[in-house]
Every structure is written in C-alpha cells, then in structure tokens.
Image (cartoon, coloured by chain):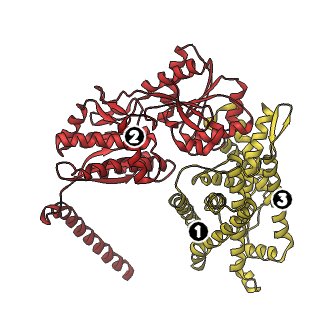
Chain colours: A yellow, B red
Amino acid sequence: MLLQQMINGFTLGSAYALTAIGYTMVFGILELVNFSHGAVYMFGAFICLILITTFKINFLMAFLLSLVITGILGMLVDKICLYPLRMKNAPKVTSLISTIGVSIFLQNLVMLLWGSETKNFPMVFNLGTLNIKGFKLSYFQLVIMGTCIVLMIGLTLIIQRTKLGKAMRATAQNMEAAKLMGIHVDQVISFTFFLGAALAAVAGIMIGMYYQTVDPMMGFMTGLKAFAAAVLGGIGVLPGAVIGGLLIGVLETLAAGYIHAGYRDAIAFAILIGVLLVRPVGLLGKPVQKKV
Amino acid sequence: MKKNRKSLILIALLLVTAMVLAACSQPTSSTNNEKDGVKESITIAVTGPLSGDYAQYGEAFRKGTALKVKEINANGGIDGKEVKILLMDDKNDPKEAANVAQRLVEDKRVVGVVGHFSSTASLATAPIYQKAGLVEFSPTASHPDFTKQGTYMFRNINTQAIEGPIVADMVVNKMQGKKIAVIYINNDWGITAKDNFTNAAKELGAEIVAEETFIGGQTKDFTPTLTKINEKKPDVLFLAAFYSETGMIAQQMKQLGYNIPMAGLSSLFNEELIKLAGDAVEGLYLSTNFFPGDTNPLVQDFITNFKVEYNSEPDQFAAVAYDTMGMMIEAIQTAGTDRAAIRDALAQMKDYPGVTGNTTFNENRDVVKSLKVLQIRDGKFTVVE
C-alpha cells in the first residue's frame, strides 16, 4: 500500500509542480504573486475541452490552440489589470489584490459561458497501465511527470541562455535600469505573462485528462497548493517549484492515507510552515541581498 | 485642509442623496400598483446557490419553481393576482445566506421563501426567518435539526432518518453487502447521512470497515482514500456525496483498477453523473423519490412541459422545487398573503399531489415520501423491483 500511495502522491505532486512552475516564473521576473494563475489554469483546461467537444478539433491542435489562447489571456490580464497599476507606481500588494479579482472574474465568466457543473474531459488517448507486482502506474502518470521535467529544463534554458531570458532577468533586477539599457520592458513582461499562462494551460489540460473532469472551481485549491509548492521550493527557483510540488503531493497523500483524509491539507500545510520556519527562503532558495 | 473640506462636502452630499433615495423607494414601489391600475402581484422568494460550487442545484431550483409559476399565471394566477418570483443567490455560503434571509424578511412584498438548498445554509438562516415569522420552505434540506429550529421551517425531502434505513436495507439485502466502506462529504448533510446509514446497516448485521471523509468542492484527488479503502476489501462502497464528487470517485477507482460495487443516496440521481463518469458508474445502486419513468400522468406532464420550456430533462432537484412552489402557492390560495396564515395553511396541508409523490407534513413539518431503488444499467437509470 505504501508504494501505491507514493505513486498516487507523485502524480498529484507533478500536477502541483506543473502549476507551480508558472507561479514561480512570474514571481521571478516581476516579484508578483499572481493569484490569477489558478483561474488561468482552469481556463486553459476549459478552452481545450470546448475546442475538442464543440469545435471537434483533434486533440493535438486543440492543445496547441488552447496554449496560444490562454497565453493571450495571460497577456490581457497583465495589460488590463496590472499594467495601469505599474504605471501609477502602485504598491505590489495592489497588484496582488488585482490578480485575486481577475481570478474571481474568470471563474464566474466560465460559469456563465459553460455552466457551473463538473464536466467530463474525454480520454483522448488511453495509454494503459503498467503493472508491477500489484502496483499500478499508468503511463499517463509518467507523461505528466515527464512534461513537468521537460518544461522545467526548457524554461531554465530560456531564462539562462537566450537573449530574451537575459532581458527577463535584467527586468527582474531593475526595471528602470533595464529600460535605460534599451530593453522593451513592457514586451518582456507581456512575454512572461504569455509563457506563464501557457504553462498553466498545460497543467490544467494534463490534470483535466488525468482525472477526466474539469470544473470552474478546479483552479482554486490547486492554485493555492501550487503557490505553497513554489514557496516551499524557494520562490523564483524553477527546480525548487518541482521539488516543492512533488513534496506537497506526497505529504498530502500520505496524510490522507495514513492519518485522516479530513486533515490532509492541514497536515501538508503544517509541514510547509515547519520547513519555512527552519529555511525561510525555501528548500532551494538563496538569500537575496537587497540593495540599499 | 482644502482637500478635507471637499471630501466632507462630498460625503454629506452622498448621505443626503442616499436618504432621499431611501425615502422615495419604499412607498413608490408599493403604491405604484394601485395607482396605475397595474395587475396586483404576489411575490414568493426563491433562494439557492445560483453561483459558486453548487450553482447547478440553484439552477434546478430556478427552473422548477419558474415552471410552476408560469403554469399558475397562465391559469389566472392566485385570485387574479400574478405570482412573481424574487430570485436570490445565497452561493450556498451560510454567511451569504444569512444576508439574503435578512433582506427577504425586511422586504414586505415577500410572503414566503422557497429555499435554501443545503442543510448548512438552511440551518444558518432559520433563526432569522423564525424571528420575523416568514415561512422557510426548503426543497432539499434533510438535516434532522432543520425543522426543529422553529415553527416556520418546512422541508419537502425525506430526512436522513427516513432515507438512511431504506438505503441500508438496499445495500445489505439487495447488494449482499456484509463489509461496507463509507465515503462521506464533510458537512451537516454528509455527517447525518453517514450516521443514519451506518447505524441502520449495523442493525442489519453488516460491518462498517472504513469511514472516510472529504471536503466538498475542494477535494479532487481521491486516490489515497480509495487505496486505503481497497486494502480493507469491502463488498460495497457507500457514498454519502453529490454526483460531481461521486463521478470523480468512480473514475479514479477505475483508473486505480479497483472494482468495488457502489451505492448512494437520492443525491446521486442526476443524468450528469452518467455523462460525467460513463461506464465507471455502471452498476451503481441509488434511491430516489422522483423517477421520470414513472407512468403517473402528473409526472409525465411535468417532464413534457419542462422539456418544452428548457430543452432538457428535469432532475429530482427541479422536480422537488416544482412541488415546493406548488405547495407554497396552494397555501397562499387558502390563506391569502398574511405570512402567519400561510404558515398555518401549509402545516395543515394534506396529501398534496406532487410529481415527487403525495405529500403531507407530520407534526414536525417534515415529510414522508416513498423511495424507489434504482440501478445504473447500460448507462441508464433503471428501476430495481
């Protein structure tokens, strides 16, 4: 049973990790906790579902198309709700509240458009399960974990090795100075939001397919957990998000399996608080020296 | 200083406008009807979750009650007065529901309330309605304590004290469940449903091998719970849950490769369950007091009218909301529009012929309705004899 529970936990954890990557990237660039991320994740899953069921587009096209649509949504969120605040030099907490507003707006928009009931997400490809001595590991679980690692590596490369990545890092360090060096700060930020939202859509679609259900509130809890995962791993550090996500998933599953299902979140979050008390910067985070 | 004074003036102005508006709005709305000779109307409030996690149930309330009202108005309303629905969203949140209740009791046009949806919201609002003397007639709140809150609380659904033993009999005798595992939603309804079921099942000689819970609207991942339950090798998995979570449980169980027969309460009777979970819910047993296959002409007419109006099949929530509105209107027809008189008329109502069966209140203003046992066979709800 322990092995099966670990497998359950790793799959759930991969879902958190996928979502946490988006959180941590936006934070890394903008130092903004983007609470609309959970709702964007849900939106991505819904768009993909609608493209498949209503417009009868094949899965691969629908998948790519929903990444683009969700990415554009992410850019719009920034342009409409955050850009005006940046222009007015509003405190960061104002932007944070604005993202919470966006998340509520998106949830209700989806409910209005497509109804509030839980919807079936069609099983697009049945990969079957791997049976090892009575323990079941579905190939789809491996796909989720694999996607998670590929995205993590890919993003790290974009940020560390490309010119655009350099511009992103420069913007993160000092927006004014980056602007003076001729970096199109607004474009860089737009790109960051595009990427973050597209990542959220990947996570949403994967999870929709794994549980074969989507509902307008699916992003709320996952968003919170993914945020916790990003903080646990060290916010702003991509591998940290993955490790944090896996850890929370496994802890939660073990708590539900061996202690009490009603306290699963409480136990997982208690451990999170414990870790942060010992290492306030998170597991892989490095203390940042703030300029005076 | 200048800024301060400006804002002071602004606040004062706002206050004055607010007062003027408040003073105007009340009398105009009530006198308008008589002055202009517009047909008088009677307002009944309908409240439930129209947004949020449980909005599909609020939607069923809205459709069911609106259909009844449409039928009544087409036949001349109540004594020539048009019936109007005042629709309020309580988001299935007890705090929000209390706000809604407060507004309804203060609104003098409202003569009765159909709602709220969950036992939790209904319990939270009961003291407000009781104090003001306004009927709170819930189509769905099945927690035993709800109608004990006061003399203005009515319900149109079997309490779990009645449904629990019937379903326990179904699980132990029809499904041969000797070792039963239970998953229940962690709220007022889920806990009483679980308690009533497990007590009755134990009396019938069954053993409860696992009791697991989850948080409604939050828990999406049931794999640890199911893995734990599978270890206990139960004959039957009993679910005190709604269809959305039941669909997820069934699908995740299939994905994990476990094969445990499932049973549930009337809360699962919804076509969406089959749409959602497909063959994962094949063979599931459940109870219900509304079944569209019923040959009763009353039921068939209701289904036809509902399809014409909304182009979809009614579920039991729409059906019970339809009946609840019907009973409320009948009480108003005998008692007039006095809030207290409506309560008395409702309490004395005998054998109201509804689509969810004949309904009479007992001395606690609870109903007793017969239940049918259904099973999902070949992707359809089928009556089990």
Q: Residue at x 66, y 45 (%)?
A: A269
Q: Which mark is residue B300?
A: 2
* Relative side of B333 to B378, left or right: left
Q: Position of residue A115 (x, y in %)?
A: 52, 55
Given the image, on which type of amino acid does mark 1 rest? Ser
* Amino acid on which the number 3 mark rests in the picture: Val
First reached walking from the N terminus: tag 1 or tag 3: 1
- Label 1 – label 3 distance at C-alpha: 31 Å
Asked if disc 2 and disc 3 are in contact, CB closer than 8 Å, the reply is no
- Residue tagged by mark 3? A150
* 1 and 3 marks on the same chain: yes
Q: Which residue is mark 1?
A: A95
Vertical placement of B17 versus B167: above or below? below
Q: Is residue B258 left or right of residue A215?
A: right
**Tag 1 secondary structure:** helix
Q: Mark 1, residues whose alpha carbon is within 10 Å: few (<14), some, or many (≥20)?
A: many
Q: Nearer the viewer, residue A45 or B107?
A: A45
A93 is higher (above) or lower (below) than B95: below
Q: Please state the horizontal and vertical placement of residue B206, each as a whole percent of the image.
A: 59, 16
Cα separation, mark 2 vs mark 3, equals 57 Å
Subunit bearing disc 2? B
Parent chain of label 3: A
Residue B232: quarter of image:
top right
Amino acid type, residue under disc 2 in the picture: Gln
Few, some or many C-alpha atoms within 10 Å of disc 2 (few <14, some 14-19, many ≥20)? some
Tag in front: 1 or 2: 2
